[in-house]
Image (spheres, helix red, strand yellow):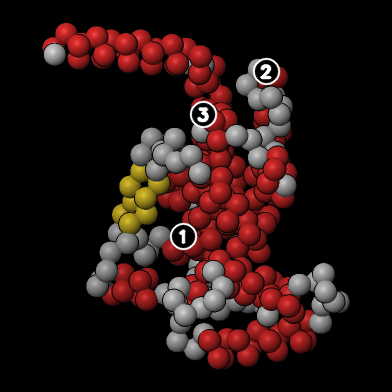
Amino acid sequence: MRYVVDAKHHTLDVEILTTVIIAFEQRCLLQDDVHCLASHEDVDLVDEDIIGIYYRACALARRDADSRAPALLRAADIGTASIYTIFGGQGNTSTYFEELRQLYSTYMPFIAEFLTSSAELLSSLSRHKKCHGIFTQDLDILLWLRQPQTTPSSESLISSPFSFPLIGLLQLLNYMVTCKSVAETPYAFRRHPSGTSEHSQGIITVVVTAAADTRESFGSVSRSALINLFWIGVRSQQTYPRQLFLQQWSRIQWSTEKEFQRQC
């Protein structure tokens, strides 16, 4: 299937691609969905390759992907399992952009439109006059995804002007992928989890998942959420810049060391 969907090698024949997809589904997806198949230990390709190739093939063939509910959701529906959504806060990881890159590679057919509009929004906001001195370059997510060598340093990505909106975007994309992979709207998917947990900025993502009923409303509410997260990150940096933080942290370390020496 990888060869068939790779347009670099040949002109795409949708009929052949559809035949390949049907054969793949009949042979490999009779009992499991593509995520279960990709997790089998005897598969040579990494998980994301199998999932990404399958969804890309379906998108190119304009064919709905297999969207059966996984066993965990079925168990939740009959009460033999409980599912909770968890949305973390700012600064909980320094590698979150690599997660975003993996989503981009694996689930592009699901997230392309939303990711593009969100990236354009954040890029535009980063050029706002009130952000003077905060960004040394546009917040250009699509460029960083397409050209990894242009990605800002980890130190920059973990700072609040970057991490607040980008971690929020990552959480929203993960939720969108979850809904679309089982062909459910945000409203329909809400029946599965028994509850949700959040920390810090994660409460904004929780509000989106609670307020959005359709895919359209998910997009509009998410836009408002990203705008809020962007300005929270920028204002945090302006009010408490990194240089001031380092000065305060040095004083805390000095005081701690002195107290430790005194007690010893």
The location of residue 161, given as percent across then percent down, is: 56, 28
Q: Using the image as rendered, state which of residue 194 and residue 172 is in the foreground.
A: 172
CB atoms at circles 3 and 1 under 8 Å apart? no
Residue shown at the point (41%, 39%) measured from the top left: 92
Identify the image quadrant of residue 137.
Answer: top right
In primary-sequence order, the first of circles 2 and 1 is 2
Residue 70, visible in the rendered structure: yes
Amino acid on which disc 1 is placed: Tyr
Residue shown at the point (51%, 14%) measured from the top left: 243
Q: Using residue 241 as the reference point, say whether residue 128 is left or right of it.
A: right
The location of residue 63, given as percent across then percent down, is: 67, 78
Callout 3 secondary element: helix
Callout 1 secondary element: helix
CB atoms at circles 2 and 1 under 8 Å apart? no
Q: Residue furthest right?
A: 11
Q: How far apart are marks 3 and 2 (CA)?
A: 15 Å
| Labels 2, 1: front one | 2
* Figure quadrant of the N terminus: bottom right
Residue shown at the point (56%, 45%) measured from the top left: 97
Residue 132: image tag: 2
Look at mark 1 in the image and give the residue it sits on. Answer: 187
Look at mark 3 in the image and give the residue it sits on. Answer: 160
Q: Say few, some or many: other residues with alpha carbon within 10 Å of mark 2 (under 14 / 14 to 19 / 20 or more).
A: few
Q: Distance between the residues labelled 2 and 1?
A: 39 Å
Q: Using the image as rendered, state which of residue 33 and residue 247 is in the foreground.
A: 247
CB atoms at circles 3 and 2 under 8 Å apart? no
Q: Say few, some or many: other residues with alpha carbon within 10 Å of mark 1 (under 14 / 14 to 19 / 20 or more).
A: some
Amino acid on which disc 2 is placed: His
